[in-house]
Amino acid sequence: MMLARATAISCQWLMGSCSVNSVTLPDGKSWSSGVFVEKCKYLEESKCLGICINTCKLPTQTFFKDHMGVDLYMEPNFEDYSCQFNFGVPPPPLDTDKALKEPCLDICTNARRRRELGRNSSPDELSCPQV
């Protein structure tokens, strides 16, 4: 709960407006250990799912687990650019994490450029290099 409050207060300069909310922990209890980012500035400015995943979501989850001893599952919403931080909830395995299965954002300049360059390429060659 302390990490949620500290994150909501100290990280608004990077992520934008956020608030503490309740999340359901693995034992089924509800706890005020979540942070809801209304519209992530980092994702909104980068316009890139791969940047979100590789330079924010995965490293942040790893940092809190390895250096703070706290599980964290981050759930970015690529439609409205919000993000839910779930402190105390372990992230799913990479092969089942919904965020890692999302396609490149249409607005991503890197994806747009790959599409322009690869009109005769296979879809696999044009996919977003996420993880």
Image: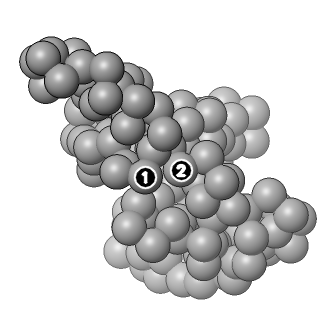
CB contact under 8 Å: marks 1 and 2: yes
Identify the residue at horizontal 51%, vertical 66% (top origin): 81
The 10 Å Cα crowd at callout 2, few under 14, some 14 to 19, many 20 or more, is: many
Label annotation for residue 47:
2
Q: Quadrant of the N terminus?
A: bottom right
The 10 Å Cα crowd at callout 1, few under 14, some 14 to 19, many 20 or more, is: few
Identify the residue at horizontal 38%, vertical 67% (top origin): 79
Residue 26 falls in image quadrant: bottom left
Q: Is residue 65 visible?
A: no
Identify the residue at horizontal 74%, vertical 70% (top origin): 16
Residue under circle 1? 107
Residue 95 pos. (x, y %): 24, 32
Q: Secondary structure at mark 1?
A: loop
Front residue (pair 34, 115): 115
Q: How is the image coloured?
A: one colour
Residue 53 pos. (x, y %): 49, 39
Front residue (pair 112, 75): 112
Residue 131 falls in image quadrant: top left
100, above or below 14, in the image: above
Which amino acid does the dot numbered 1 rest on?
Ile
Question: Which of pointers 1 and 2 indicates the residue nearer the eye?
Answer: 1
Relative side of 119 to 48, left or right: left
Q: Secondary structure at mark 2?
A: loop
Residue 106 pos. (x, y %): 34, 51
Label annotation for residue 89:
none
22, above or below 16, in the image: below
Relative side of 30 to 59, left or right: left
Relative side of 126 to 99, left or right: left
Q: How many numbered callouts?
A: 2
Q: Earlier in the sequence, mark 1 or mark 2?
A: 2
Front residue (pair 106, 7): 106
